[in-house]
Amino acid sequence: MAYILNWRDVQPKIAHMSAVHWGGFRDRERVDDPDERNRLEQLGGFARHALQGRKTSDHHQHDQLEQVYYILSGTGEVLYGDERFPVRDGDAIYLPAGVHHQMFNDMNESWLEHHVISQPVAGPGGEFVICNWRQVAPEGDGVGSVRWRQLARGGDGQEGNLRTLLAIEREAVQPGGQTRVRCEAFEQVYYVLENRGVFHGDDEEQPLREGDMVHVPAGSSYSIINPNEEWLVYMIMAA
């Protein structure tokens, strides 16, 4: 069964010098830690960060982690290597292992909010890229949802940037609609970006609202329902 937790129910802390950090789901193998967020089997983990105006994060690197920063709101800049790149809401930023990076919000008064999605890799490597969902051709499921695949794993003749993560996607379910019934062979985390809906799985319905994190184990059968008059929007992390 899927497990749902809203980021507002997590105690925040300060991380990377200036960011307010709300931890999301984490590796289930954490020793002597009974936290219910420890349930990931393949995904490495993710956290929500909020960087206030006039602040920057620290300058750092990860030699054995590939990361994706997903911009939830605001604008700013990301430093990758020696160059700064503008970022905005809806950007998925792929940060390969082994290269220094840093977030900047010192040019703004308002907050810059983003997810930090991390996945272990075997050493440095990869190609930096920024992909906004608005740049991607949408794909419908033939029922009631539209999906934008922003980042994907390469291999088997397919182009992609991710090395161990499978995909970072954005999806929207139309008003009064629902997705097909799904049963994937890989682990997923859904994160609700806009509005409300219903997660239907294992003959049980659970309400969804903005800010909910949904852990979906591999092999789960489920669908997403939107009984409302506004589009239901969420992102999907898969490994």
Image: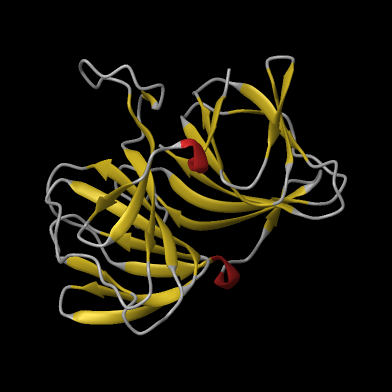
Residue, far bottom: 107
Left or right position of 154 against 228: left
- Position of the N terminus by quadrant: top right
Residue at 49% over, 23% down: 218
The mark tally for this picture is 0
Front in this rendered view, residue 226 or 170 = 226
- Position of the C terminus by quadrant: top left
Front in this rendered view, residue 13 or 160 = 13
- Using the rendered view, name the quadrant where residue 208 is placed: top right
Residue at 34% over, 55% down: 20
Front in this rendered view, residue 239 or 39 = 39
Left or right position of 136 against 19: right
- Using the rendered view, name the quadrant where residue 112 is placed: bottom left
The answer to whether 172 is drawn above or below residue 180 in the figure is: below
Q: Position of residue 104 (x, y in %)?
A: 30, 75
Q: Position of residue 193 (x, y in %)?
A: 60, 53
Q: Position of residue 17 (x, y in %)?
A: 20, 60
